[in-house]
Amino acid sequence: MIRIPTLITALFCTFLLSFPSAKGQQATVSTFQPMDIFELEHVSHPSISPNGSKVAFIRNYRDVMTDRTLGNLWMANFDGTEVRPLSSGLHNDSSPAWSPDGSMLAYRSDKSGKTQLYLRWVASGEEAMLTNLTESPGQPVWSPDGKWLAFTLFVSEEKSSLVKLPPAPKGAKWAEAPKYIDDLKYRSDGAGYLRPGHRQLFVLPVEGGTPRQLTEGPYDCGNPVWSADGQGLIFSSNRHPDAETEPANSEIYEVSLNGGEPKALTNRKGPDSNPVLSPDGKLIAYTGHDEQYLGYQISRLYVMNRDGSNPRLISGDFDRSIENIHWSGDGKGIYFQYDDRGQTKVAFMTLDGKSRDITSKVSGLSIGRPYSGGDYSVSRNGRIAFTHGDATHPADLATCSADGKVNRITRFNEDLFGHKSLGKVEEHWCNSSYDDLKIQYWVCYPPGFDPSKKYPLILEIHGGPFAMYGDHFAAEIQLYAASGNIVVYANPRGSSGYGSDFGNEIHHNYPNHDFDDLMSVVDAVIASGNVDEENLFVTGGSGGGVLTAWIVGHTDRFRAAVVAKPVINWYSFVLTADNPAFFYRYWFPGLPWDHLEHYMKRSPITYAGNVKTPTMLLTGEVDYRTPIEESEQFYTALKLAGVDAAMVRFPEASHGIARKPSYLMSKVLYVLGWFEKHKK
């Protein structure tokens, strides 16, 4: 049980009950409040019918009584008419998939208490539960003839222990048996300590029945696609003998419905994944790159013949990561999604590498912070459905015709935002003081902003570090602004969405000059004349927590800092995080004991003796990405150094602290409480 100091308790009550109203607004208009987090809704999993006439999607909402984010299956016509629910209730639906003829929808749902596959007949509204599995099936994929579904499913494996204990006497109550571990990757953030087993491929007739397993062995399989004749599946997997120490070296495989050993269609060092079959069944498009062991590597678009011959790079010098690929109905090109300078876009590329943007404003899958992202679906005739959002609202459903005309269909948060005054978000650029590199940033002003006044400033730093903020709704940013702060967030060097060179500015050199980028952004905002320079604050999570800890070890200009789920000591991190084979190999020149000086030079713990800034640490207790031991190290170091420090531990929370709505609210209130305590 977390004990909250009396001062912060009082502040919590103040924030919850009386966030300031927007100046000049009518009494019925207020600012965004912490409890409004439970009122937020967003759209996900858009799935357009093969003929482009209808769109199935998930309407997500937050249930205040169970503290969960839930989602129900909905449908709308492409023109925006007849927006209606197909399911309701306190459960989670996901992954709707249309049958080839558009008459049925397969989807996943936990309405029975455990995630299962369901089939819905669109015309009649009848549906059936197809599976009754003890494990949760993956995304359903239709066969070309509409008679089968393929999916992945976790298959547990027996694992022998080193010893065999004698049986306990009848009626005895012994302690739980010790856990014997001999795998390099033995736990995963969000999943906890891993059970022995792997995700295998299965097929199931649409009438239901017993799923049939097609693959086996100590390898995980990616989501499959069907061969044109419906007699096999194509999928990605890392089935190399050294897969444990080379986790990114996947290939494209095919396996027959009759079983047998999968056949590799690619063979190079580097990840090959996300295979998609062309409409005529003659080509396979996929994404990947040649392995260079760089921290940031662009995912490129490739095409090969159906048998794996003649692989060729399609995207050429397109300097952005390509993902979520779909063939056009005529097979002349490929739709894809990419991040670019704060926006997520859908584009189209011909087989000779010529590309054009179709739509931007793809957004909305992150509610807490303004991360890029989103999803889209394309029909055979080129109609697109996508998650549409910007800084003023989370993801809604929108459609886009072949000529690029966008129609926003839903406005699920209008009932909330119709009487709320949100902070205005503006985009800006500045030059880094280190080398004049151009840095993009955004400023969110308090509702009712008065340009004649000065306001405290909060610098909020994104994680990753290979990630991107942008013009996206963020509850945390809005709540910080609603409490009377100017909030600034930026994409310093190392962020994605600006090309390979920009991303690799921090290769084996993080953190370093991204500090200069962020300080340049703060200076640029101060130059506007509206910042109270006596009240500067800084916070960030994950990679942003690393940079926040780095900042307080290198400058005293901030009144207070909140370091969320950070890495403090890179040496201990690569040996305790959930993907050690990846982190040490891609982010550092080698193993920590061979490069001790390099690891410690980049570690915020090295500069703990310089810290004067009051600093709060905030982490989930079952975070296995940046384990809480990292926060504990910094907290103890600051306490020993006489720094005003505090630590907030979120019980049962993994790296994604904000997955529970109440934890998102708590995180914001602790940050604001700490800053308020130290405000001058």
Image (cartoon, helix red, strand yellow):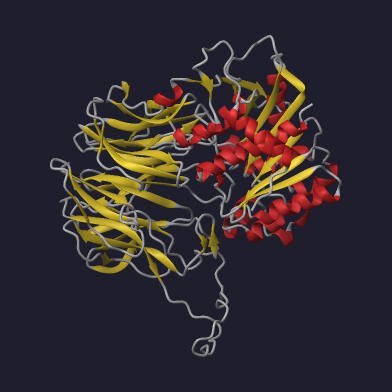
* Residue 161 seen in this snapshot: yes
Q: Is residue 333 above or below residue 587?
A: above
Residue 551 location, x and y as percent?
75, 37
Name the residue located 31 percent from the left edge and 63 percent from the top edge: 133
Q: Is residue 206 above or below residue 25?
A: below
**Residue lying farthest to the left in this orientation:** 124
Q: Is residue 339 above or below residue 260?
A: above
Residue 236 location, x and y as percent?
38, 56
Name the residue located 19 percent from the left edge and 56 percent from the top edge: 148
Q: Is residue 106 above or below residue 400?
A: below
The answer to which quarter of the image holds residue 480 is top right
Count of marks placed on residues: 0
- Toward the viewer: 378 or 431? 378
Q: Is residue 475 left or right of residue 144?
A: right
Name the residue located 61 percent from the left edge and 57 percent from the top edge: 577
* Residue 498 seen in this snapshot: no
- Toward the viewer: 278 or 550? 550
Q: Is residue 469 left or right of residue 217?
A: right
- Toward the viewer: 622 or 648? 648
- Toward the viewer: 95 or 569? 95
The answer to which quarter of the image holds residue 82 is top left
Q: Quadrant of the C terminus?
A: top right
Residue 23 location, x and y as percent?
59, 13
Q: Is residue 580 left or right of residue 435?
A: left
Residue 346 location, x and y as percent?
38, 31
